[in-house]
Every structure is written in C-alpha cells, then in structure tokens.
Image: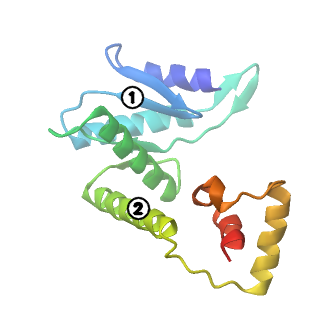
Amino acid sequence: LLGAAAARIRSCTPSIELVARLGGDEFAVIRAVSDAIEAQSFAEVLRASLERPFVIEGCEYYVSASVGVAISEAASTPQSLLSEADAAMYAAKDAGRNGFAVFDHDLRQQMTEWSAIQRDLHRAIEHHEVVLDLQPIEVCRAAERVRQRLRNPPTAEDGAQASMPSDIWGLYSA
C-alpha cells in the first residue's frame, strides 16, 4: 500500500520534483510554486488522488491524507521547511483529517509558544522546581502502570527521571 501511495504521489508530480518517504506513512514533496494559491491547489490534487481506492491483489483499500504545506521564504532552510510542513500536517489532522493546511503566522506562533513551554518544563524538571500533588486513586492507577512497565525501577543516579513517562517520574519523585 505504501508503494502504491508513493506511485500515486509521484504520478501527480512532474519528473523534476522530489518525492521522498520520510518514515511510516509520511511523504515529502518538494515543488517549486509561484504562490500559496498554487501550493494549496497542488495539496488538494495530492489529497484527492490518495482518496481514490487502491486495488491491491483484488482488494480495495481506502486511505485519507492530511497534507501540510510550507512555502519557502528567504530565510528558509531545508530543516525549517520540513518542520513547518510537519506542523501544518498536524494542523490538518487536528482539523479533521483528509484535508490540508498551510503553515502560516498563526502556526509559527503556536510552534514558538509550544517550544517555550517544552523548554521551560524541561528546565523546571532538571532544577526540581516541579511539585506534584497526588490523589490516592491516581497513585494506585499509576503504580499499576509502573508495575506493568518496569522490572527495575530507575534511580536518580541513572539520570532516568527526565526521560521517564510523567506518571512513573511522579511516583519516584513523590
């Protein structure tokens, strides 16, 4: 199915464009466009082409596509374009899947805010500035998840608390 999807994506693009599988079921298409309207039109062509059923060994398979569009600016780098297209794709998924979204000022603001929150949270955890208020029922549920996931509990010396799931970190930090 992934191969058939890749072939269909490729059929929507002229031979000079780049189509690459990023991983899982995510693909990137690098295409020169004159403006955002042309980019949106191409995103719709891609989405519609993937909406048609795939027939593989006599069976029909249906997929949906969420397309993220990033438009190059003077300061764009390949990494920033992939990051922006990825953010737009998740915005399209959040809007109900099987659609497309264009990376814009609002998404840039959301990415900036989210990055700041992540950075501040990591710093707060590293500096032991996070305080947990636990309720007994939640502790029991989290303890059960810990028993299911861990055989040897990590220690602070292992440096594992920053990479542990929050419920496990909470139990060992409480």
Residue sitting at the far left: 74
Q: Nearer the viewer, residue 113 or 160?
A: 160
Give the amino acid type for the residue marked by disc 2 in the picture: Arg
x 19%, y 39%: residue: 35
Residue sitting at the far top: 15
Q: Nearer the viewer, residue 137 or 67?
A: 137
Q: Which mark is residue 29?
A: 1
Foreground disc of the pair 2, 1? 2
Give the amino acid type for the residue marked by disc 1 in the picture: Val
Q: Nearer the viewer, residue 147 or 104?
A: 147
Question: Eyeballing the image, is 163 above or below 126?
Answer: above
Q: Quadrant of residue 30?
A: top left
x 44%, y 47%: residue: 89
Quadrant for the N terminus in the image: top right
Label located before the other in sequence (2 or 1): 1
Q: Which mark is residue 103?
A: none
| Observer able to see residue 160 | no
x 29%, y 62%: residue: 109
Q: Say whether residue 108 is left or right of residue 53.
A: left
Residue sitting at the far front: 157
Label 2 belongs to which residue?
119
Image position, residue 100 (x, y; %): 42, 47
Quadrant for the C terminus in the image: bottom right
Image position, residue 129 (x, y; %): 49, 76
